[in-house]
Image (cartoon, grey):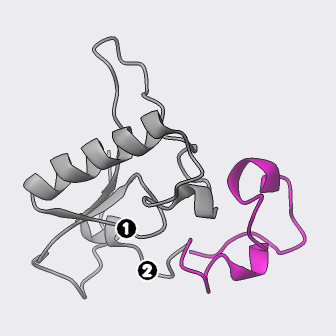
Amino acid sequence: MRAPALSDQKTRAEFYPDVDKRGLFREGYIAERSGHARGSTLDLTLVDRFGRELDMGAGHDLSSPRSWPDDRTVGAQAQDNRRRLAEAMARRGFAPDDKEWWRFALAGEPHPDEYFDFPGR
């Protein structure tokens, strides 16, 4: 996968306001090859019983230090929600990403160097 042209800044405010677009791959916000393609990595959040997303302090896919799981500039409730999510995922064998509170990878995944190419539904 390749990010669109460096000159295209249409989504900067929403997705990478604190990071120069040239650094998105180098700084680890975008992977050249993703664990998603191996079926071992997933993105998720917490919701309440009505399906409303809980406060996580930064939106999904925000490439910014505010998205780091241990960022302390977000509010106390968001910090607690991030901790709860990470603990729940760890109990189920998933390790957190260091740059994105929403991303978790299966620890000890069976195919760490294999990428699959098959049609999805």
Q: Residue at x 26, y 71 (%)?
A: 38
Quadrant position of the C terminus in the picture: top left
Q: Which residues are magenta?
A: 1-29
State the image coordinates of residue 5 (x, y, percent, origin top left).
81, 73
Q: In terms of depth relative to the viewer, which is nearer, 43 or 80? A: 80
Q: Secondary structure at mark 2?
A: loop
Q: Secondary structure at mark 1?
A: loop
Quadrant position of the N terminus in the picture: bottom right
Instruction: Please name the amino acid that badge 1 sits on.
Output: Asp
Q: Is residue 51 left or right of residue 108?
A: right
State the image coordinates of residue 16 (x, y, percent, origin top left).
72, 60
**Mark 2 or mark 1: which is in front?**
1
Q: Is residue 36 magenta?
A: no
Q: Earlier in the sequence, mark 2 or mark 1?
A: 2
Q: In terms of depth relative to the viewer, which is nearer, 5 or 49? A: 49
Q: Is residue 8 magenta?
A: yes
Quarter of the rendering containing residue 115:
bottom left
Instruction: Please name the amino acid that badge 2 sits on.
Output: Arg
Main secondary structure type of the part rendered in magenta? loop
Residue to which mark 1 is pinned? 97
State the image coordinates of residue 68 (x, y, percent, origin top left).
50, 62
Judged from this view, the residue extending furthest toward the right is 7
Residue to which mark 2 is pinned? 33
Q: In terms of depth relative to the viewer, which is nearer, 32 or 50? A: 50
State the image coordinates of residue 99 (x, y, percent, origin top left).
48, 67
Q: Residue at x 53, y 55 (%)?
A: 72
Gap in Å between the C-alphas at discs 2 and 1? Answer: 15 Å
Q: Is residue 91 left or right of residue 49?
A: left
Q: Residue at x 60, y 51 (%)?
A: 73
